[in-house]
Amino acid sequence: MFPEAAPDMKPHLVVTSGAGMSAESGLKTFRDNDGLWENFRIEDVATPEAWRSDRALVLRFYNERRKALLQAQPNAGHKIIAEWEMVFRVSVITQNVDDLHERAGSSNVLHLHGELTKARSTADPDLVYPVEGWELKEGDRCEKGSQLRPHIVWFGEAVPLMAEAEEIVASADILVIVGTSLQVYPAAGLAWCAPGHARKFLIDPRPPVAQEFTVLECGASEGLLRLAGLLDRG
């Protein structure tokens, strides 16, 4: 799609992606009419209190999501972002907990809200392990003997990588926001961390008012394809 550029000549392109990015791969978003929120209350599956009150339910919820992820494939939008590494220094900051960006070929991905394919110790948050297959079970323990929990940032928990994400966006030459409504904070605040010289693009089928952005009013893959053409023409 693009001629390859020398590494030291590549502008920094930062992509921030949200649930709409993965919806085209068949992964439901929490705001779909038939999405996961319809079957589970946030309080029951995605909070520290839920983990303390019904660990089995929380494990089952994320096991089902992990099973769906293993059946999903990266879509055209994921692949376009990965291809941009030929001509840009690409950083992906995603609110998604899936690994579709990585599976499409993106090599620099920061997961703000954790990773579904990993588990971490309840005694030491620095102990993080890959989940083999789709199932994390009661009795799966870390080397310190504590139960493993999903490596997910739950509602009510701090977002530990937020400062790093802000630094990445602050160094952007091009900022692309795709698949996110700019309504979920603190992640939505990243949109305003880009420097004044950066070119800013927002891809959304129902975009909010965002005068500082060039808006592509369409879905993720279609918008990224259109944007690829714009960037290719300079």
Image (cartoon, rainbow, N blue to C red):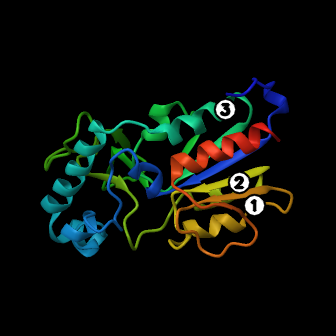
Mark 2 is on which residue type?
Leu
Task: Compute the Cα span from label 3 to label 1.
Answer: 20 Å
Image position of 3 with respect to 13: above or below: above
Viewer-nearest of discs 1 and 2 = 2
Q: Quadrant of the C terminus?
A: top right
Residue visible at 27% across and 37% down in the picture: 71
Q: Position of residue 100 (x, y in %)?
A: 43, 40
Under mark 1, the amino acid is: Ala
Q: Amino acid at mark 3?
A: Glu
Residue 85, disc: 3
Q: Which residue is mark 2?
A: 175
Looking at the picture, how far across and down is residue 12, in whole percent?
76, 43
Closer to the chain start, of discs 3 and 1, is: 3
- Depth check, front residue: 95 or 22: 22
Which comes sooner in the sequence, label 3 or label 2? 3
The quarter of the picture where the N terminus appears is: top right
Residue 153, position as x, y percentages in the image = 40, 61
Residue at 62% from the left image edge and 31% from the top image edge = 83
Q: Which residue is mark 1?
A: 194
